[in-house]
Image (cartoon, helix red, strand yellow):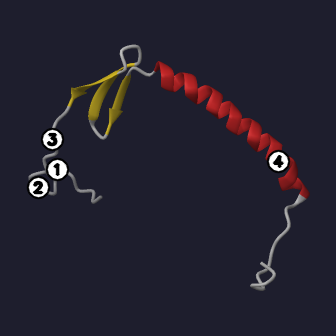
């Protein structure tokens, strides 16, 4: 970065001391997310419902309705 004459900023002591706390929070979130993902049996993604069976390694689609645009703008006034 010196060769490109870019300015660098140093890490403050406060930020340096918060880094281990951030690591602990991240690890805790992963520890909570893994069991939640393993115990999830029904997933709804983009309006399609799926049933997940881990023991049989099977995913089954439960509910699907093809997209149909609204007939008028009054039904869905919000633009994507």
Q: Please tell me which residue is depicted at 30% across the width and 58% down the height of the picture.
A: 80
* Mark closest to the chain's N terminus, 1 or 3: 3
Q: Are marks 4 and 1 in contact (CB under 8 Å)?
A: no
Q: Which of the two labelled residues, at mark 4 and mark 2, occupies the earlier sequence position?
A: 4
Q: Are marks 4 and 3 in contact (CB under 8 Å)?
A: no
Q: Where 79 falls versus 21 (above or below)?
A: below
Task: Give the CA separation, mark 4 to mark 1.
Answer: 49 Å
Residue 66 image label: 3
Q: Position of residue 66 (x, y in %)?
A: 15, 41
CB within 8 Å, label 1 to label 2: yes
Q: Which residue is mark 2?
A: 72
As drawn, is 49 to the left or to the right of 9? left
Which numbered tag is attached to residue 75? 1
**Placement of 12 over or under 33, stated as above or below:** below
Q: Report which quarter residue 60 is drawn in.
A: top left
The residue pinned by badge 4 equals 18
> Which label number is shown at residue 56?
none
Q: Is 41 placed above or below 4 here?
A: above
Which part of the image, by quadrant, shows the N terminus?
Answer: bottom right
- Camera-side residue of 58 and 41: 58
Element assignment for label 1: loop
Q: Quadrant of residue 67?
A: top left
């Amino acid at each position: 970065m010196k060769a490109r004459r870019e300015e660098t900023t140093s890490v403050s002591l406060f930020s340096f001391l918060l880094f281990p706390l951030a690591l602990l929070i991240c690890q805790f979130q992963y520890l909570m997310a893994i069991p939640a993902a393993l115990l999830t049996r029904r997933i709804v993604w983009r309006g399609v419902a799926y049933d997940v069976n881990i023991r049989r390694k099977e995913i089954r689609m439960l509910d699907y309705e093809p997209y149909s645009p609204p007939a008028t703008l009054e039904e869905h006034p919000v633009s994507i």
